[in-house]
Every structure is written in structure tokens, then in C-alpha cells.
Amino acid sequence: MTAGQSHDGQAADDLLDHVGAGTILLADKAYDSDRIRGSLRDKGAFANIPPKVNRRSKPYFSTWLYRERNLIERFFSKLKHFRRVATRYDKLAENFLAMVQLASIRLWLRVYESTA
């Protein structure tokens, strides 16, 4: 977990440690850097990141694969409807994680509840 004011790109190295060969990483333009792409290439993974507008050499980018990222974005949008999660009332990371898990369970139950 990172601080609320820091950019996620600073924690990208820690997340990339868990990426294995054959994995496809879907990320937004903020993660478009040669360092991240090179790290993924060394691990045998594929970076499907849209290139920034000012990038001189445009790497391959699949819009078809990138559509799958929409599912993740919609999940986080629904998660932010829970006020306690969106405003990060909890000071401790463990408590914040517990609230994210409870909110996720509630969202899951809403989808799979009986309509009878």
C-alpha cells in the first residue's frame, strides 16, 4: 500500500516482482516507460500499455486486450461508492484492507443474491 499522495508508478517495481512469464500486464498511460516495459520483457511478460502521445517510438499496443481493463476500472468505481474506503478513514493498512475486503464481499453478494 502506498501513501495517498504518491503516484502508483513509484510502487510499480514491487508489483512487477510478482509477474511471471506469459503474463499480460494491462496498465494506463501513466505506466508507459521503457523501464517498466524492459522489466516485463526480461521476465517474459507482455506489457499492453497505451503509448503516451509524445512518445517517439510507439511500441505495440492491442486495443482488443485493453478492453479487459474496463472490468477492473468498473470494480474500483463501485468500490469507491463505499465512503469509508473512498476517503480512507482508516489509518492502519490492515484496517483499510479489511474494509476493502468487506466492501468487495458486499459487492459480490449483491451480484449473486437470490432474486426469488
Image (cartoon, rainbow, N blue to C red):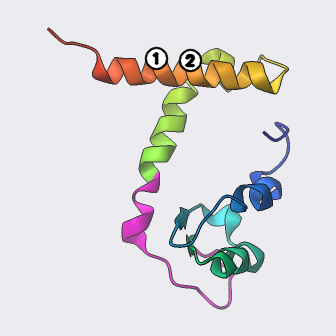
Question: How many dots with numbers?
Answer: 2
Is 94 left, or right, of 91 in this rendering?
left
Confirm whether the magenta stretch covers residue 68.
yes
For the magenta stretch, what is the residue range? 51-69
Q: Which amino acid, mark 1? A: Arg
- Residue at x 64%, y 80% (from the top left corner): 41
Confirm whether the magenta stretch covers residue 70.
no
- Residue at x 40%, y 59% (from the top left corner): 67
Separation of marks 2 and 1 at Cα, in angstroms: 6 Å
Is 44 left, or right, of 84 in this rendering?
left
Is 11 left, or right, of 79 in this rendering?
right
Q: Is residue 87 in view? A: no
- Residue at x 66%, y 74% (from the top left corner): 40
User: Could you classify mark 2 by the number of other residues whose Cα lies within 10 Å: few (under 14), some (14-19), or many (20 or more)?
Assistant: few
Is 102 left, or right, of 39 in this rendering?
left
Image quadrant in which you'd find residue 44: bottom right
Instruction: Report the magenta stretch's main SS.
Output: loop
Locate residue 14, reporting x and y percent. Answer: 78, 56
Camera-side residue: 74 or 16? 16
Locate residue 33, reporting x and y percent. Answer: 73, 74
Quarter of the figure with the C terminus: top left
**Which disc, if any, is residue 102?**
2
Locate residue 87, reporting x and y percent. Answer: 72, 22
Taking the view exactly as shown, the residue that stands out farthest to the left is 116
Relative vertical location of residue 72 with respect to residue 51 in this rendering, above or below: above
Relative vertical location of residue 49 with respect to residue 11 in this rendering, above or below: below
Image quadrant in which you'd find residue 84: top right
Relative vertical location of residue 35 with respect to residue 93 in this rendering, above or below: below
What is the secondary structure assignment of the residue under circle 1? helix
Q: Which amino acid, mark 2? A: Leu
Q: Which residue is mark 1?
A: 106
Mark 2 and mark 1 residues within 8 Å of each other at the beta carbon: yes
